[in-house]
Amino acid sequence: MNLKLNFIFRGLKNKNYRLFFIGQSISLTGTWMQQVALSWLVYNLTNSALFLGVVGFSAQIPSFLVAPFAGIIADRYSRHKALIITQILALIQAAILAYLVLTNTIQIWHIVALSVFLGLINAFDAPIRQSFTIDMLDNKDDLGNAIALNSAMFNSARLIGPSIAGILIALFGEGVCFLINAVSYIAVIYSLSLIKINHKTNNTAKTKVFTELKEGIKYAFNFRPIRLTLSILAMISLMGVSSQVLMPIFAKDIFKGGPQTLGMLVSMAGVGALIGTFYLASQRKLKNIIRIIANTSTIFGIGLILFSFSSNFWFSNIVILICGFGMMVQMASCNTLLQSIVEDDKRGRVMSFYTMAFIGTIPFGSLLAGGLAHKIGAPFTIFITGLGCLISAYFFTRTLPALHKEVLPILNKKGL
């Protein structure tokens, strides 16, 4: 048993990654508290599904527009220093939000503006953080495990944060959650300050930005495994992940609950995702990674369709757990595959395209989901998004033989 656990958590043997893991785990718990509190606050202020979509759009559209340039920064400059800057800025955003709520001066336009600000921060943070993972590892063979542990960390926080948020919102209101999130950033900033990385200057730093961007786009979209992986990721995010913006409607109007009900739904998705991370962390080789992407995309789509038909709270929680498993394993597998086959000098740019496909498409999906739910209701909207995920999974599955022929030789060459 100990040997099995040591294998699952082998990435933590790397000191720099271990420091990052501890600090980020604390910070992400605060992030999930803020996310639940913010969605509840928006719905209470406006009682509008459309505004839930608008706020989701505002928070994530910068990732679609800015992420490619963040990838260039990740390939040119110190990812370590850039991450410290993004975390300080995120602390400031959370502190302003806490102040406005605690002083009862918050308005919906404040939320939209601060969501755009945080979206800009995350647009730079995500590709830099993703490509920084390999820099923290002494043993590069631990990359796949570290990516899985990143997901475990994210989803452990997703399990804990919303549960705490539901209780705190009921007792003290949303402002306390925003304040705790601001304080939690101190942990990750401190842990990043302890990490020792020898940054290597990239010789392309004098190259024109748009030349590097064009080079990255050409590389990613001319290489079929990267192109198709980004495509299935984008479709699942657009159609499926964005449906989470409707959870306050299910909690309040369908299940007749309060913030604790919302916290439970989000947490159950986190439980499923956490199970998925341990499943991925236990994988010794990556030969089945493409098949896993196809299967979990299908599972996620089926789970959303089942959730759309359910009016039983406890059955819905089980289905949400399955959705969380499918969504997390699919996205972490896409991340692992991309980082395993990409050339090192283009890692930052490819991970910026990953960010665009994963986070950058969500705002369009959030706006679409909010608008559809306003017209046809949340349950039927979730059904449509689940069906979209199933169709995307079907077309991706048809490409598996061709993808295996191109990917397996690369993985074999790298000993993965």
Image (cartoon, grey):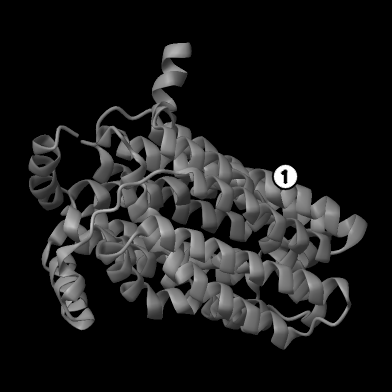
User: Residue drawn at (11%, 68%), measured in percent from left and top?
Assistant: 222
Front one among 7 and 387 = 7
Q: Quadrant of the C terminus?
A: top left
Most foreground residue, 381 or 21: 21
Q: Which quadrant of the view contains residue 125?
A: bottom left
Instruction: Count the labels in the image.
Output: 1
Q: Nearer the viewer, residue 158 or 321?
A: 158
Residue at coordinates 43% horizontally, 69% vertically from top-left?
Answer: 124
Q: Is residue 103 left or right of residue 249?
A: right
Q: 348 or 202: nearer the eye?
A: 202
The x and y percentages for residue 98 are: 77, 69
Pinpoint residue 259: horizontal percent, then vertical percent: 81, 59
Left-right relation of 262 to 65: right
Question: Residue 275, position in %: x, y?
Answer: 52, 35
Q: Amino acid at mark 1?
A: Trp
Residue that badge 1 annotates: 314
Q: Is residue 161 left or right of residue 353?
A: right
Residue drawn 42% across and 17% down?
Answer: 4
In this rendering, the answer to whether 249 lies above or below 144 is below
Can I make out residue 322 in this image? no
Q: Position of residue 313 (x, y in %)?
A: 74, 50
In this rendering, the answer to whether 393 lies above or below 110 is: above
Q: Is residue 280 visible?
A: yes
Residue 131 lies in what quarter of the image?
bottom left
Q: Residues within 10 Å of mark 1 (few under 14, many from 20)?
A: few
